[in-house]
């Protein structure tokens, strides 16, 4: 027997002291299964390069995980490279010494560094998060090697003796502590294995029968009884046909256990090897989403870093759903974490997908990721590939691209805001849905409308609320774009900051000259007459509405169906919304408030407005004049913004009063 002390490297043990390895105790499953996969990968490599002549090229490799509630143990067994006693001393007793690194250094001239998962030496010790005692039984692949057993009970002392393992590989037995006995439940362990190891490149079996074990007496008796009963049934039925006997023999064989993982996930294949149905099935399996994705991007590169993955663009059910994305990060098919924004551009986290980055360690700090140049290059590459895919779809399959636009536009706009490089790459493919029921790029829209609106892009934020303005635009052959989501406000400001010849104005911000009448006698009144009309109407409406700050203008509009509209300058409206978003706190910042910037525009060509001109000077019709003025104002206001409860109550009461007078 040999006894000794664990050799602790103080510079590497500090992270353990600070955070005891990992924040989630279930991570030990990932670490031990990953180590087992490493052991098998190493043996495969040695066999391939002729360093393991006693290993068959047709060897079937597997990892077995078993639980024993009575003994309170969990075992992880592999048929990989195994270890000698000296290797246990080197790789196990020296904490933070990476066995994978040592292996790669030794054989670096004969092999690449792919398919070896471990890049650090703490993974094995994660098992002490749940185990009071850990036992290793191992036998090296080397000719003449002797089995070894290593036992440690969580302190810095261990015992190592000769072992009794007869086959190559390693078994790690965890004697689970009382407070962690829930890990002995098969359903819980299966869930953890599915989470972390669902795509690990070696078949994993959970609580599968051990083919090397001989059946117990009870099982033999059961089999005998079953055979006798089956024979009697056949005898009674006089079933003597040889084919039936053959079928019976096949039926009596135990069912072959199935691995719980997929060792060849879709992202490991070349895109031209995958069918649309395979992509959809993989999406359903991984994300438990039975709605079909719109489309996907398959990433596959080897230089200057290795990266594989699939990004899915899901169909959104409602505007806010785009925040529920999930991008899973893997290392050599071992799950690391969800939504690591240091590796994956933040805006891509709105999507669903998988990324396999073998060049990143399984466990690494955020500060490392933020400073690592490879990580930055990786993030930039992913962003470029996404932009390239979208641009290609826009150019080659525009009709289909347009059919996706309503679903993917929140993602694209968010990406533009978050990353200038992405905006520069994608801006020529960004679409705007127009009131003419089509889609156009910003350039296309400006070219179609520049003669009538100069560099102004009018937009609709609420199609129902602003229906009157939309009709007014359509009647005059003008277009506006729909910008109706919460992202559109900051997106507009972002575009304006980089596109100096573009200015967004809501459709009710001002009147385009194209909406005003140019007919003789309808828009050419002299300035003195216009001024007099404005003053008279302003005085009337201020008195009727008890609002001495209301601004009123009289214009001749081409549309005779519109009696009045409310206008609010774009910048004033944006400042109002900004102040509202800050809870009114901008007053304390010295920012001006724009509570009285709205103006009422009366259409001189509308019959009701014409009636007001004749009524306003009739003292006997004063009440009627005020009634019409208030009704005109509320009708215009309803097309601009929702009425308050008090305003709506007055509007309904006034409407009933007007209808009552008509009915008299």
Image (cartoon, rainbow, N blue to C red):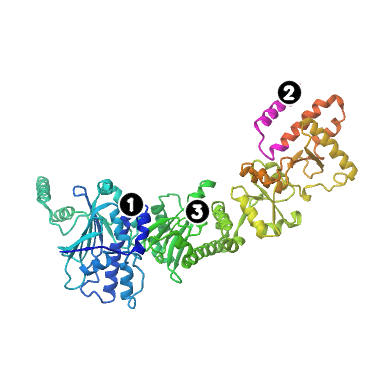
Which circle marks residue 494 in the picture?
A: none
Q: Element type at marker 3?
A: helix
Residue 431 % position (x, y): 61, 56
Residue 115 % position (x, y): 34, 67
Foreground: disc 3 or disc 1 = 1
- Disc 1 target residue: 25
Foreground: disc 2 or disc 1 = 1
- Disc 3 target residue: 350
In the image, residue 367 above or below residue 179: below
Q: Is residue 358 in view from this perspective?
A: yes
Q: Can residue 655 be found in the magenta stretch?
A: yes
Quadrant of the image containing the C terminus: top right
- Disc 2 target residue: 660
Magenta segment's dominant SS is helix
Foreground: disc 2 or disc 3 = 3
Quadrant of the image containing the N terminus: bottom left
Q: Element type at marker 1?
A: loop
Q: Is residue 349 left or right of residue 168?
A: right
Q: Is residue 33 in view from this perspective?
A: no
Whichever of labels 2 and 3 marks the residue nearer the N terminus, that label is 3
- Is there a contact, CB below 8 Å, between mark 2 and mark 3? no
Residue 98 % position (x, y): 32, 67
Separation (CA) of disc 2 from disc 3: 56 Å
Query: Which region of the structure is painted magenta?
Result: 636-658
């Amino acid at each position: 027997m040999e006894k000794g002390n664990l050799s602790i490297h103080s510079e590497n043990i500090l992270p353990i002291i600070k955070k005891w390895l990992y924040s989630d105790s279930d991570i030990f499953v990932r670490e031990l299964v990953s180590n087992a996969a490493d052991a098998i990968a190493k043996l495969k490599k040695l066999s391939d390069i002729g360093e393991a002549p006693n290993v068959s090229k047709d060897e079937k490799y597997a990892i077995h995980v078993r639980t024993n509630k009575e003994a309170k143990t969990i075992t992880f067994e592999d048929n990989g490279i195994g270890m000698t006693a000296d290797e246990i001393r080197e790789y196990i007793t020296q904490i933070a010494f990476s066995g994978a690194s040592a292996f790669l250094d030794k054989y670096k001239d004969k092999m690449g560094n792919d398919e070896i998962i471990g890049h650090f030496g703490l993974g094995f010790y994660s098992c002490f998060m749940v185990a009071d005692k850990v036992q290793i039984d191992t036998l090296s692949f080397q000719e003449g090697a002797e089995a070894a057993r290593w036992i440690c009970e969580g302190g810095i002392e261990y015992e190592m003796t000769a072992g009794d393992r007869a086959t190559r590989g390693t078994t790690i037995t965890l004697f689970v502590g009382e407070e962690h006995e829930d890990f002995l439940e098969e359903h819980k362990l299966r869930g953890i294995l599915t989470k972390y190891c669902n795509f690990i490149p070696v078949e994993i079996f959970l609580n599968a029968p051990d083919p090397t074990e001989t059946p117990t007496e009870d099982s033999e008796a059961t089999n005998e009884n079953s055979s006798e009963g089956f024979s009697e049934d056949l005898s009674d039925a006089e079933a003597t046909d040889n084919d039936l006997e053959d079928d019976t023999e096949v039926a009596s064989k135990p069912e072959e256990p199935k691995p719980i993982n997929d060792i060849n996930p879709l992202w490991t294949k070349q895109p031209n090897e995958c069918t649309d149905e395979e992509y959809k099935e993989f999406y359903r399996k991984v994300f438990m989403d039975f709605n079909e994705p719109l489309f996907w991007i398959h990433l596959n590169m080897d230089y200057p870093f290795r990266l594989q993955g699939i990004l899915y663009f899901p169909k959104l059910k409602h505007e806010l759903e785009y925040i529920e994305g999930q991008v899973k990060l893997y290392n050599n098919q071992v799950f690391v974490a969800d939504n690591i924004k240091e590796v994956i551009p933040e805006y891509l986290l709105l999507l669903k997908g998988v990324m396999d980055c073998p060049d990143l360690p399984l466990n690494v700090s955020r500060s490392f990721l933020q400073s690592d140049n490879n990580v930055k290059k990786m993030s930039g590459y992913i962003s470029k590939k996404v932009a390239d895919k979208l641009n290609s779809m826009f150019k080659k399959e525009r009709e289909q691209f347009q059919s996706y636009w309503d679903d993917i536009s929140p993602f694209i706009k968010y990406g533009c805001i978050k990353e200038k490089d992405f905006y520069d790459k994608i801006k020529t493919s960004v679409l705007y849905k127009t009131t003419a029921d089509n889609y156009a790029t910003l350039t296309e829209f400006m070219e179609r409308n520049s003669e009538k609106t100069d560099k102004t892009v009018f937009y609709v934020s609420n199609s129902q609320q602003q229906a009157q303005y939309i009709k007014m635009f359509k009647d005059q052959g003008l277009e506006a774009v729909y910008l109706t989501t919460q992202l559109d406000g900051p997106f507009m400001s972002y575009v304006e900051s980089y596109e100096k010849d573009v200015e967004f104005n809501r459709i009710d911000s001002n009147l385009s000259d194209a909406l005003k009448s140019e007919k003789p006698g309808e828009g050419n009144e002299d300035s003195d007459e216009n001024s007099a009309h404005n003053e008279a109407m302003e005085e009337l409406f201020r008195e009727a509405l008890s609002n001495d700050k209301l601004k009123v203008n009289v214009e001749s509009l081409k549309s005779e169906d519109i009696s009045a509209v409310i206008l609010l300058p774009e910048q004033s409206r944006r400042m109002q919304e900004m102040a509202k978003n800050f809870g009114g706190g901008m007053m304390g910042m010295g920012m001006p408030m724009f509570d009285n910037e709205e103006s009422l525009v009366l259409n001189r060509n509308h019959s009701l407005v014409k009636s007001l001109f004749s009524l306003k000077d009739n003292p006997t019709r004063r009440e009627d004049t005020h009634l019409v003025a208030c009704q005109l104002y509320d009708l215009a206001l309803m097309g601009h913004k929702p009425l308050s409860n008090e305003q709506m109550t007055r509007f309904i009461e006034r409407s009933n009063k007007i209808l009552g007078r008509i009915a008299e």
